[in-house]
Amino acid sequence: MAASSSAVSGLAGSALASRPAFSTGFVRGVRVSARNPLMTRNLERNGRITCMTFPRDWLRKDLSVIGFGLIGWIAPSSIPAINGNSLTGLFFSSIGEELAHFPTPPPLTSQFWLWLVTWHLGLFISLTFGQIGFKGRTEDYFEK
């Protein structure tokens, strides 16, 4: 369906003399030339390709949220509530036990996986709520 005005002679031959123009049977008389979509104007700023509708700082990260969120999770997870042990203590001790036989990975029945998933799930929930609360307060989201 697509016709080209120049012939391609293969890998060993010469390159195309000019850009091929494509035509289609759906729209007669319209010739469209192939072009690189990344070379359009107004797409590149400071050597970077940007999208005009997506905000550049979408994460709006703040290191104080990460610091307070980490402290806010380590403090309650260090309370000895599981048979006299804390979740952080159990997780870190299971890391040490698994590193004792390092080249061999921990088996699926190991308590390490339970402590790993539980500790990190709590950390990520704490960081998420910290980000929501901190940014909501700085942007007056909770004001009436």
Image (spheres, grey):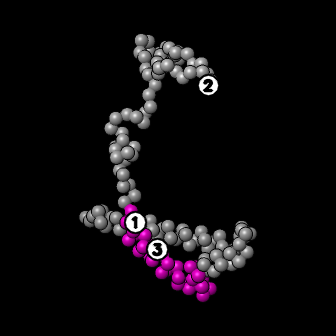
Of badges 2 and 3, nearer the viewer stands 2
Q: Is residue 105 magenta?
A: no
Q: Is residue 71 magenta?
A: yes
Q: The disc labelled 2 sits on which kind of residue?
A: Leu
Q: The disc labelled 1 sits on which kind of residue?
A: Gln
Task: Decide if residue 53 is in sight here.
Answer: no
Name the residue that disc number 3 marks: 70
Task: Decide if residue 9 is in sight here.
Answer: yes
From the top left corner, tell me how far across and down residue 24 is, in percent: 48, 16
Element carrying mark 1:
helix
Name the residue that disc number 2 marks: 11
Q: Give whichever of discs 1 and 2 has the lower sequence position.
A: 2
Residues packed near mark 3 inside 10 Å, few (<14), some (14 to 19) or many (20 plus): some
Residues packed near mark 2 inside 10 Å, few (<14), some (14 to 19) or many (20 plus): few
Instruction: Examine the image and state in which quarter residue 80 appears.
Output: bottom right
Residue 29 shows which numbered tag?
A: none
Element carrying mark 3:
helix
Instruction: Examine the image and state in which quarter residue 66 appears.
Output: bottom left
Name the residue that disc number 1 marks: 131
